[in-house]
Amino acid sequence: MTTEEKYRHILSNHLPAAAVDWVYNYLNFHKVHFHITRERMSKLGDYRWPRPDHTFHEISVNGDLNPYFFLWVFLHEAAHLETHLKYKEVQPHGHEWQEEYRQLLISYATFFPPEIHPLLKKYTRRIPLSHPVGKEIETALHRYDPDYNPDLLTLDQLSVGNRFRLMRKPELIFESLEKRRTRWLCKEITSGRQYLVHGSAEIMKC
């Protein structure tokens, strides 16, 4: 197996089949160091732009996401890359990034299931992007999780002060303390330790 075949095979385990060629070519064209990570409670993906001590674009995406959610997060991070190429350093999720993300979602909407298309069209209709519709898309994308349970909630559906279990860590009980943009500050009850947990995390209310 060649190096290209190996990388394409890895990508095919995490992306919709139709998106593999595009993502491979995108990473190759921009010489991106791409990492598929284990689950991170605080974030789903990350982008780092080149610096003197870090001379390459770097994108990471959590490897526990279903293929459509993985693509959703990858496009989010690719929009950061595109924004950096055009504008260098601007607000992380300002109008420039929102426009780049909007254009990527419009261009590659066909990689998502047809039932998601109306939400994507609504989401990308104008800048600024609609935060509630974005959350609605993430909720819809969770339906493609292999262990999807229609009775589950996401952390964003709870209010401050609720206790819950993360589906990925059901042995622990957390309490939501404070909403911070896309993440929640939460406390693990037994240890008292605090964590930032992404709002799209699937949970069971206690």
Image (cartoon, grey):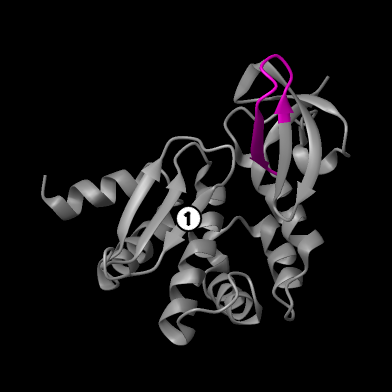
Quarter of the figure with the C terminus:
top right
Q: Which residue is mark 1?
A: 46
- What residue lies at 28% left-to-right and 63% top-to-bottom? 54
Quarter of the figure with the N terminus:
top left
Looking at the image, residue 13 sits to the left or right of residue 158; the answer is: left
Give the residues drawn in magenta, as a range.
Answer: 187-198
Badge 1: how crowded within 10 Å, few (<14), some, or many (20+)?
Answer: some
Residue 197 forms part of the magenta stretch:
yes
Q: Residue 84 in the image: x percent, y percent?
A: 45, 77
Q: Residue 48 in the image: x percent, y percent?
A: 41, 62
Q: Nearer the viewer, residue 44 or 138?
A: 44
- What residue lies at 36% left-to-right and 57% top-to-bottom? 20
Looking at the image, residue 153 sits to the left or right of residue 105; the answer is: right
Q: Secondary structure at mark 1?
A: strand
Looking at the image, residue 78 sits to the left or right of residue 191; the answer is: left
Amino acid type shown at disc 1: Asp
Question: Is 74 located above or below residue 173 in the figure?
Answer: below
Q: Nearer the viewer, residue 157 or 192?
A: 192
Q: Residue 55 in the image: x percent, y percent?
A: 26, 68
Q: Residue 158 in the image: x percent, y percent?
A: 85, 38
